[in-house]
Each structure stands twice: as C-alpha cells, then as structure tokens.
Amino acid sequence: MISKNRNWFYLLSFTPAIVVISCNFFGGVFAYGNIIYTLVILAFFEWKTKNIYSNESTDTSVPMFILLCHIPVQFISLFSLLYSIKTHVLTGSFIVEASVSTGLNSATAAVIVSHELIHKKAVIYRSLGKLLLITTGNVYLYIDHLKIHHKWVGTEKDHTSAKLGENLYQFIVRSVSGQFKGSLLLESERQKNEKKLPYGIGNYVVRQLVIQAIIISLLFYFIGLWAVKAWFIQCIVSIFTTEYTNYIQHYGLVRKGKERVNETHSWQSDNFISRFLLLDLPRHSDHHYLASKPFHSLSSLKNSPVLPTGYLGMYYIALIPKLWFKIMNSKIEEFKKINSN
C-alpha cells in the first residue's frame, strides 16, 4: 500500500533523464536507451502493474523540490545530446536515435513539469514553466492551455479535445495548427487592446518563434548542422508525444452547451507507472476540477471514465487507429450506459 511517503515514488520521473544523459555520453548503440526504456520496458510493464488509488494529500516540500530539480536536469539532458554531437561521441544515425530518446524525455518530464508550473500563481514559477517549454520547441502551449483548453475542454472550441472517430494523426494536425493559430490570434488581440503591435515581440507566440530562431542559429554556428537537426528532432518528438497525451486525455468525451466541466470530461488512469513517472498527470479529471491543485494532491474520481491502462501502455494502441477505435469506442458506449442509468 502506498502511504503518505508516496511522494518519493515521484522520483521515478527522473529515470528517463538518467537514461538519456548516460546513454548520450556513452554514444553508439546506447543512443536507443530511452526509446527502449520508455516505449518498450515501461510500456510493457504498465500492462502488468496494478493501479494505485491512494488519494491522501501529502507534504508539499518534496513535490516542489522534485519539480524544481527537473529544470536543471532538463538542461543537462539537452547538453548531453549537443555536447556528444560536438565531440563526435554521437555520429551518423545514432544522432537521430539519441535525439528521439531526448525528445521523449522532454515530453515525459519537461513538458509535464512546465504544465504544473504554469498553473501556479507565482510569476517565478510561471516563468520557469515557460523556460522549460522553450527547451521543447513548444511555442503555443502556455497560451492555449491556460486560456483556451481549460475554458473550452470537451467543446468544438477546444483544439486539444479529440473527437469520437478521429484518429491520432488527424488529431495532431488539427490540434497543433489550431493551438498555434488560436494562441497567435489571442495574443494579437491582447496586443491590440494594449495599443501595441499585434505581431510584435510582445506577442508571446512571436517571441517564442524568435527565441527558437536564435537557438537554431547559435547551434548551427557553434556546433553545426547536425546539432540543428538534433534540436528539430527532439522538439518534434516532444510535441508529437505531448499531442498523443492530449489525444488520449479527452478522446470522444463531449461537453454540451453551457455544461460545467466535470469528472466525466477527462479520461483518467491510476496505473502505478504512469502516475509516478508522469507526476500524476493521468489524474486528469481532478486537474480540470481545479487547475491550480498541486499534482501530488490530485484524487482519483470514481465517476470518471478510466483508460484500460496507463499513458505509456496505450501508446501503441493509439498508433493503430482501428485497434484504438475498437477498444475506446466500446468503452465510451459502456461509460454512456452506466451514466444514463
């Protein structure tokens, strides 16, 4: 049984970064390290591990310490990739594999930690959250998630709520383009209201694009073309994995009219690995009840729809649309019947 000391289980969230850093410095076939660890080993064991339903709120010092430690660890992970390219520890196709491994860690750690930080009221935490998003190449999440997703989740106005019958690949195209356009437009309107240039540097999305251009230019100048390619690959993998997460969190769940957001609008999972590796992100239903609620105090809600297993275990199922629809559409029908009684 997981007691109040479950805080320490969140240290599992550092393991992909440890694998990435070690394998990047070793080079060669070790470049596959985090791909195998995250998408093979952890994904397999998610189907074998039990759910952990503990709901007790715990001391905040350890969870906050874990969040803050993830910030330097993310930069060390990226440094290990770029330094190994510069010193030729990583060469040829191994750079691609190492970049994919690093991008997976950016999604399962940096993006999730940034998500937690940008929901906090303190400016310093939000700033750190935005800093982490820069390292993943995500130029729109900060605006879209806070100002669009939480307001319109489960409706047609939310780009990150996957529709029933929409496959992962269709969703990613619609979600990324919609989030980018929506965030850019929202920021341009804010700029206009403040009597500033709508697409000037004050526009968050524009500013992030400029920052990405600067990063890419510096990488090319100091390291070379392979560093630029590696940066793009890790960013693309991070964004793809983040959008996969968006896909499974709300797939097929609809909020009608002026209906208030409730526990039936998000899929949740209490799988041990996903819970502690992903800092309780799978308890997504409770997160939408109160977005500022710290991750370690999120509860398992009995009326929420439940995924067959954790986020990693569902990864390959989502990649195969027919298999995904067969499993998830039937679960949606079952959930509707239960809630109609």
Image (cartoon, rainbow, N blue to C red):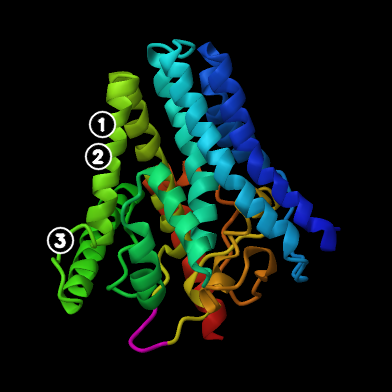
Q: What stretch is highlighted in magenta?
A: 255-259
- Quarter of image, res 253: bottom left
Relative to residue 100, is residue 192 drawn left or right? left
> In this orientation, does residue 255 appear?
yes
Q: Does the magenta stretch include residue 257?
A: yes
Residue contact at pointers 1 and 2, CB within 8 angstroms? yes
Q: Is mark 3 on a helix, strand or loop?
A: loop
Q: Is mark 2 on a helix, strand or loop?
A: helix
x and y percent of residue 317 in the render? 48, 45
x and y percent of residue 215 in the render? 32, 36
- Magenta-highlighted stretch: main secondary structure? loop
Residue 199 is labelled as 3
Crowd band around label 3 with a 10 angstrom C-alpha radius: few (<14), some (14–19), many (20+): some
Residue 217 is labelled as 1
Q: Nearer the viewer, residue 127 or 333?
A: 127
Question: Residues under labels 2 and 3: Cα distance?
Answer: 16 Å
Q: Does the magenta stretch include residue 235?
A: no
Question: Residues under labels 1 and 2: Cα distance?
Answer: 6 Å
Q: Residue at point 53% right, 14% down?
A: 27
Q: What residue type is labelled 3?
A: Tyr
Q: Which of 190 and 311 is in front in this view?
A: 190
Residue 213 is labelled as 2
